Amino acid sequence: MDETISYLKDRFKEEQGRFDHFENKCAKFLTAVSIVIAALSALTGLKGGVLFQVSSPFEVVIFLSFTAAAVCIACSWGHALSALRISECPSLPSNRPTADYLRIVDAEQQKLHIYNCYIDTLEKLKKAIDEKSKPLELAYSELVFGASFLMLLAILTAIRELTI
């Protein structure tokens, strides 16, 4: 049983590290998307709001491309914020009843209780990590779509500038 508890301690430390890694990744991603939003906002004011002048079908496509990019990036920001939301990092029981229980039972019951505490906490920790990874994955996908629309916007804008 000692080897099993030692193994579970190692897994618990690894999972806590993964949880911290996801927290840090969410924070960095949210910062990056916020910078992209600021740049996109600056782009809207470029050349006196030329993006919002829709007098031809070509300019409508340019406007729609910008709008799609803005929506994708805004959704990405929302999902990154959702992934970052403060959630409880599950931890092992550290309250008085647990300590009192471990003090009064024999060594085998102590080991069994510690084993159960690790198993229960590891399951909660894995669930918390999974809950963070889903919105972060969505945020990344949406950012890729937004970047694709921005690339299309840049190409269309360059074509418009070269043909005018």
Image (cartoon, rainbow, N blue to C red):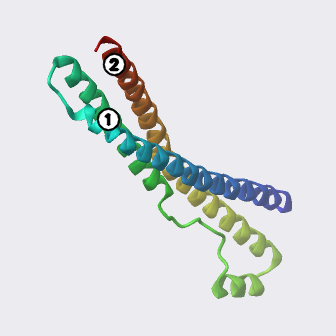
Say if 147 sits above or below 92 in the image.
above
Res. 47 image quadrant? top left
Q: Position of residue 34 (x, y in %)?
A: 46, 50
The amino acid type of the residue labelled 2 equals Glu
Residue pointed to by mark 2: 161
Q: Secondary structure at mark 1?
A: helix
Q: Which numbered disc flags the more N-terminal residue, 2 or 1?
A: 1
- The 10 Å Cα crowd at callout 2, few under 14, some 14 to 19, many 20 or more, is few
The amino acid type of the residue labelled 1 equals Lys
Q: CA distance from mark 2 to mark 1?
A: 12 Å
Q: Is residue 64 left or right of residue 36?
A: left
Q: Position of residue 134 (x, y in %)?
A: 47, 44
Callout count: 2
Q: Residue furthest left?
A: 55
Instruction: Give the quarter of the figure containing the N terminus.
Output: bottom right
Q: Residue at x 25, y 29 (%)?
A: 63
Q: Secondary structure at mark 2?
A: helix
Front one among 65 and 8: 65
Front one among 161 and 68: 161
Say if 150 sits above or below 109 in the image.
above
Q: Residue at x 64, y 83 (%)?
A: 95
Q: Position of residue 135 (x, y in %)?
A: 45, 46
- The 10 Å Cα crowd at callout 1, few under 14, some 14 to 19, many 20 or more, is few
Res. 110 image quadrant? bottom right
Instruction: Name the disc covering residue 47, or none.
Output: 1
Q: Residue at x 77, y 70 (%)?
A: 111
